[in-house]
Amino acid sequence: MTPEDLKGLTADDLDGLRGEEVRAAARAARSLGARRFVLMGTVLACLMEFFGPSGRWFADAAGLWLVLGAPIGIWYGCAARVVSTREAAALVALGFALIGDMVELLLLNTLLPMAGDQHPLSKVPITATLTGCVIVLGAVLPEADPDRFAAPWRISRRELWAIGGGGALCLLLSVAGPIRINNGFSSGVSILAMVCVTALLVVLLARAKLSLGAIELGLYFAALSLLLLTSLRGWAITGHDIQSEYDYFELALGGERWDVHTYSNAYNACLSITILPVALRKLTEISALYIFKALLPVLFATTPVMVFRAVRNVAPHTVSVLSAIFFIMFPTFFSDMPYMGRQEMAFVLVGCAMLVVTERGWRVRDRRIAFLVLTAGTVLSHYSTSYVIVMVLGGAVAVDLCWRLGSAVRRLSRRSRTRGNGARARRTAPGLAQERSFVAWWMVPIIAGLAFLWAGPATGTGGQFKTTLSTALAQLEGKSTGQSGSSASYSLFGGSTESDAQRMSDYRAQTITQTAATRATGNYLPLSLVNQYATPAVKPAVLPLTSIGHFLQSLGIGVKGVNTVLRSGIAALLQVLILIGLLAVWLRRKRSFEPLRDQVILTIGALTMLAALTVVPQLSIDYSVLRGFQQGLFFFSPFMAAGLLWLVSWARRKAALALCAVVAALLIDLSGVAPRVTGGYAAQLSLSNSGQYYDLYDPAPAEQTAARWLEAHLEQTAPNPRKALVQTDAFTFKREQTILIGNVNGTIFPTQLNMYAYVLLGATTVRSGQVTTSYKGNLVTYAYPMPLLDSTYNEIYASAGSEIFQ
């Protein structure tokens, strides 16, 4: 301010100016102090990595600070410019930090070999790169204004004891439960953990006076507890996709370099399970096993908090909490997501993006830039998540265009009527039709283009996408037919499915066609021999009825049928709630909340995506409808909440009690507690040492011993051990792929047996005589013809859990 500006000001005005200057200086000092703390902590962590003691806690603290803590602190200022609360800024900063880590380490991995160092992902380069990036970014990125936010993140001492204590109890039980089951004990502690999580979520829903901090803390504890109940099962890497993810991670870790062209697989192109965990492993003492089984779930557990925070920007307490509960209670969240680390990290970025979408009062340009950065990060994290985002955004843009055209037609019609009456046209009342959309058409080609560049020229891993797209287009044009994946049977949109016997017959016919040319050379068993042995499809075993189940059965209640009907009914209910919620909001019935225009069009876009996954068989095979629904919950969970609130409103004075009762019942059933207590339903891995999931994905010690024996046997007897053919079923190969490193064929179906191969039978086949295969996205279990092996091969190894034939 110049002296000329001070002329004419009173003493009070001057005092006010001085006070404002003092406050501004104080804000700047606080901001500068926070940035200095981050930078000094980074330098200290770097020194500890290079010269510090070898103690576990020192290394863990320093490594986690460099990979997560410092980047979050540096990006916090940028995040604070697109969201309105401190916790939202911290969550968005987490998303920016994950993207920054992946990009920085990708550049390191690309550039350092050009300088002659073929091990760019070793400890020293990673430490130097992350430290240098934090210092450089700290010098150029904006700092957060401490007074920008309306209120601090607060939680009272009483809430901390109640909600924090309850959440800590859930967390303790969720760790103790899997450990007990892994050691062969009962699932009682895990069941108690799920009951406690249900109680905690119901309390968060019922107590409207809880502070936002208490609710967010409770949601995080509840989500993490459910995730750990599944992820901590088994002493080794246990689960479907995670076994392949871990294998590609170990390749990058062992070679201290990520080279996607060595193994051009879409899994290997996901930096969230290769480069990122390599950095965590190199800079901390956390075992590689528990980076995948514990640390990734710790990060993923923030997503329900993001759902709550995003909805809370536009809706009251009940709708916001209920939206997060729907996200947590859907079985894919705690049954499948712990086995897909790449999608866990991608969902963190999607959650951050939704925080930006529902903000109000901040510059649209800044929010759109942040949204694009976060959604573009999913391209590096997980290919399928980015494809689904493109589908949702494409549907949302189409809906928005139709909406605008309809509004324009109505305005023109209204103006023509008013002109005919000699009246002056008036501007229509504000509402969703006039609200400016956050989602813009140009977002779709940008994200789609980035996905194409990454899967194509950058990594060369787009083969699966091209196959899926060409097959899907052929099916839409009627040039090809197919059956949908089994998950499509839960969808209201339908989707053609077939019985296991039909799938088995189709699979047999397909394998005969595929092996016809090679069979003529005499490598495969003759069909005249194979056709003597049947491979009938069998139903997977279910839990035996418990005493409670037998009691219910004695009352005339068919427990097995009721459990099946309940699951199917709940699946239908969750989908119907979306439609009811949209209708209730549109008709303004029971005004639970006033959605943003973007929430409406994104929800319809997500429903369009689910319809496509269901109706086009190839899409449901390559990307499960259930996973699509879980991703869709980021968009349509508040409408599900509005739909349920409208339904329970018919209970009038008992509406709140009815709401809590319905939520508790859904959680108890979907979490697996009710079926586990009664029996008569498929066993869940988180609650049992039996069932199809356990058989397919839990490595048996006897099986691992047999695989090591076979590798040693080949080294001693085979002329070229790496070329000797070993055949085993696909799931045994996935469980033992780090041991079986030679020429392994993941099938032992009779029509595909090679006469000169070693045949390794896994634990499930030895104990039950059954094999499970995946055919067109469906698991099919069949009885294996053991007499065929006995009459054709020589048994060279046998144990209680594995057999090997030659």
Image: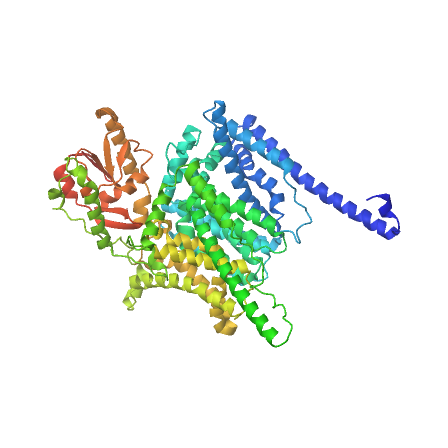
Which of the two residues, 346 or 210, is positioned nearer the viewer here?
Answer: 346
Residue at 40%, 48% in the rendered image: 230
Residue at 78%, 45% in the rendered image: 22
Question: Which residue ends up furthest to the bottom in the rendered image?
Answer: 421
Quadrant including the N terminus: top right
Question: Which residue ends up furthest to the top in the rendered image?
Answer: 116
Q: In the shown orientation, is residue 747 left or right of residue 261?
A: left
Residue at 54%, 44% in the rendered image: 373
Q: Residue 226 at x, y = what percent?
A: 44, 51
Residue 691 can be seen, yes or no? no
Which of the two residues, 427 or 759, is positioned nearer the viewer here?
Answer: 427
Q: In the shown orientation, is residue 508 left or right of residue 173?
A: left
Q: How many marks?
A: 0
Q: Residue 759 at x, y = what percent?
A: 21, 36
Which of the two residues, 524 or 674, is positioned nearer the viewer here?
Answer: 524
Which of the two residues, 673 or 134, is positioned nearer the viewer here?
Answer: 134
